[in-house]
Image (cartoon, grey):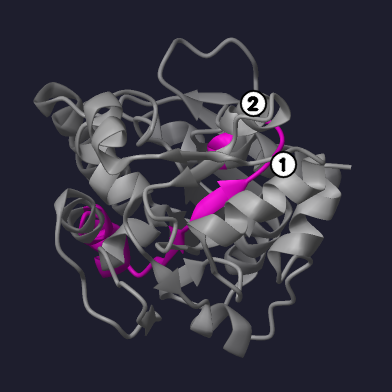
Amino acid sequence: MQIAITGSTGLIGSALVRALRGEGRTVLRLVRRRPADDDEVRWDPFGEVDTASLEGVDAVVHLAGAGIGDRRWSACYRQEIRDSRVEGTRTLCRALAALDDRPSVLVSGSASGYYGDTGDRTVDEDDPVGEGFLAALCRDWEAATAPAAEAGIRVVLPRTGAVLAREGGVLGRLLPVFRAGLGGRLGNGRQWMSWISLVDQVAALRFLIDGPLAGPVNLTAPEPVTNAAYTAAVGRALHRPTPIAVPPAVLRLALGGLADEGVLVSQRILPARLTASGFGFRHPDLGSALADILP
């Protein structure tokens, strides 16, 4: 099986490439620079795609996009986040639709931000789009896959929560702070956090490639936790105190709009479709995830 992947150097993409190659599958990595290896294919999210090299691939996984939490949200960076996802997805899907020998499936990344702030209410894939920048972004990001779906390609839209890994993401970036005994809850700590371990994220993407699901699928663990519970669990796993409470005003000063939509937002999301389809989580609860991630 030959699978093409965008965003192959990111946290999720690099882990997925290793897993697929470990299974004996052939992986083509779509890159924005001039290809340097036989397994690389040139694409420009705002221009041309080397479609000749994609003829006959079995599946495409689209993970590329500017990092949501990489920088403070200025107006300029908001636009970069949006364009990299919406325009990049549209470019790729138009290219796939134009192929003579199209892939059978496109797994095109989305995010839990689709639901906006859900408060204490649980939501699943049947719930409508929420409010705010991230919700509107995810709505338009998913809609940009229309050319692929109209061409008969099975399109899956994994709405991913906070990915937990030692190497990066929400956990990896703050590990030095927690190890120093300076970890603490964000805001009042009552906001819900919908998370997934990197191991389960990669396993779920492989599950979606092989089918038969289509449309939105929440990639979150079945047991979301509050920020206060998450903070305490990380502290216990590292045998460190978590005395600090970071006030919302400080977070807003440091992060801009990312504070309210990415850090203080409450999202209690359930992976209803993934669970109903028979997918088995290796880390259904936070304790088991942290035990593996932080030995």
Residue at position x 37%, y 80% in the image: 123
Relative to 293, is 142 above or below?
Answer: below
Residue under the image location 71 percent in, 71 percent down: 284
**x then y, percent, for residue 25:** 76, 47
Question: Residue 57 location in percent, x, y?
Answer: 56, 48
Residue 17, relative to residue 120: is it above or below?
A: above
- Disc 1 crowd, CA 10 A, few/some/many (<14, 14-19, 20+): some
Q: Nearer the viewer, residue 51 or 108?
A: 108
Question: Residue at the spot x=59%, y=36% of the render?
Answer: 183
Residue range highlighted in magenta = 141-170
Quarter where residue 27 is shown? top right
Q: Residue furthest bottom?
A: 276
Residue named by callout 1: 26
Per the model, the C-alpha gap separating discs 2 and 1 is 9 Å
Q: Nearer the viewer, residue 79 or 213?
A: 79
Which label sits on residue 39? 2
Q: Is residue 144 left or right of residue 5?
A: left
Q: Secondary structure at mark 1?
A: strand
Which is more N-terminal, label 1 or label 2?
Answer: 1
Q: Is residue 198 left or right of residue 129?
A: right
